[in-house]
Image (tube, rainbow, N blue to C red):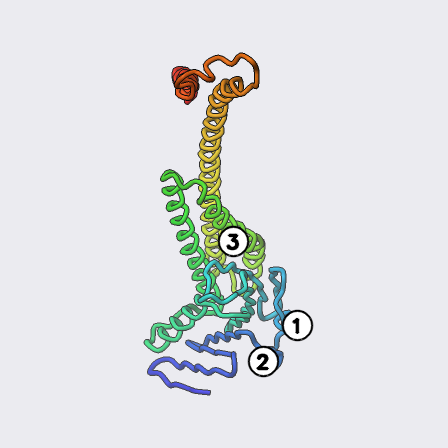
Amino acid sequence: MGEYCLCERRRTLYTYLMITKHASNGLLWIDLESPSQEEIHSVSKDYNLNPLVTHELSAPSVRSQVDLYQNFIYLILHFPRLKRGSGKKEEREQEIDFVIGKRFLITVRYGGSEVIHYVSKLFDTKATLGEGDFGSHAGFIFSFLIEKLYESLLHELNAAGESLCTIEERIYGGQERNMVIALANVSRELLFVKRSLAMHREVLESFEVAGKKLFGEKFAFHLRALIGGYYRVAHAVDGNTAFLLELRETNNALLSTKQNEIMKTIAVLAFIALPATTVLSLFQIDTLSRPIVGLPFDFWILLLMVGAVVLGLFAWFKRRRWL
């Protein structure tokens, strides 16, 4: 455990196994990454958490929820992961558990988070420089953290939008067939984000009610801003999804047009070849009288006849604009 004395503020930062604590202006943020049962029970005992909350923190949950207790709010949110690591297999979705008291915030997660790492560094830096005034209670730290998590998702969705623009250029560049898989990959990512965020609105609306009871009406604006942050992400998902659907329809239409042209060309060529084949077949019949066969230059005469039939049919198809 290390302790640092600052000029006007006191900040204590220590790490015990996977527990990291950040303190500033009387507010405490405890972050647990893939904690053990011993660590969870230790933190629960220190902050007098309800046994039900301790049980929920002990393992990942499949559903999002929000519960109001006497001195804190317990909140579970799931966030999608769009980025890939360095070739390592990672979970597509990350659960983050929040325990929000008036003077403390506890975050529990199973796996790393670039956003939480960034916010923790920012928190410590501001505290060190004497600029660590995040607010009068831990609700402000929570709202700032959620805001950054949504900002990160918006950056990822903007990158998905840029990918769709690139796909659009390649579609009109004649690469429709290759873009089928590219569109399917982007569609999978957007559907995954939409599914992961499906419960956020209901949870944040419930948290708005609980937050007013715990932190007072003065915090109402920040609570509403959290819901606004969710809507910005949801609108970005819907916008990209609408763009994707338009591109998919355009790509399918262009593919169908090309396939129809190919099929029409094959049909015309087959129709042209049929009379020529018929002519040659007539001269292969073993009869007593076969005109032309046996005359000087009979091969070339037959070749000219077949060529004339083919050219005549080709000219007729061109005139009819079937080719």
Q: Quadrant of the C terminus?
A: top left
Is residue 58 at least partly visible in the picture?
yes
Amino acid at circle 3: Val
Which residue is disc 2 drawn over? Answer: 39
Answer above or below: position of 259 versus 216.
above
Q: Give above or below for 28 relative to 156.
A: below
How far apart are the two marked residues, 1 and 3, measured between alpha carbons?
28 Å
Query: Callout 1: few (<14), some (14-19), or many (20+) C-alpha neighbours within 10 Å?
Result: few
Q: Nearer the viewer, residue 274 or 7?
A: 274
Tell whether label 1 touches label 2 (CB within 8 Å): no
Residue 81 appears at what percent x and percent y? 49, 60
- Residue 188 percent location from the top left of the image: 52, 50
Inspect the image, locate mark 1, and give the three-letter code of the amino acid beneath it.
His
In the rendering, at what x and y percent does residue 132 appear? 38, 72
x, y percent for residue 119: 42, 69
Q: Secondary structure at mark 2?
A: helix
- Observer-side mark, 1 or 3, equals 3
Q: Residue at x 44, y 64 (%)?
A: 144
Q: Residue at x 47, y 65 (%)?
A: 87
- Per the image, the residue denoted by label 1 is 55
Q: In this picture, is 293 found above or below 59?
A: above
**Callouts 1 and 3 close, C-beta under 8 Å:** no
Q: Point out the frontmost of discs 2 and 3.
A: 3
Of residue 317 and residue 179, the one placed in the foreground of this image is 317
* Residue with the mark numbered 3: 193
Q: Under tag 1, what secondary structure? A: helix
- The one of 141 and 196 positioned closer to us in this rendering: 196
* Amino acid at pointer 2: Glu
Secondary structure beneath label 3: helix
Residue 47, quarter of the rendered image: bottom right
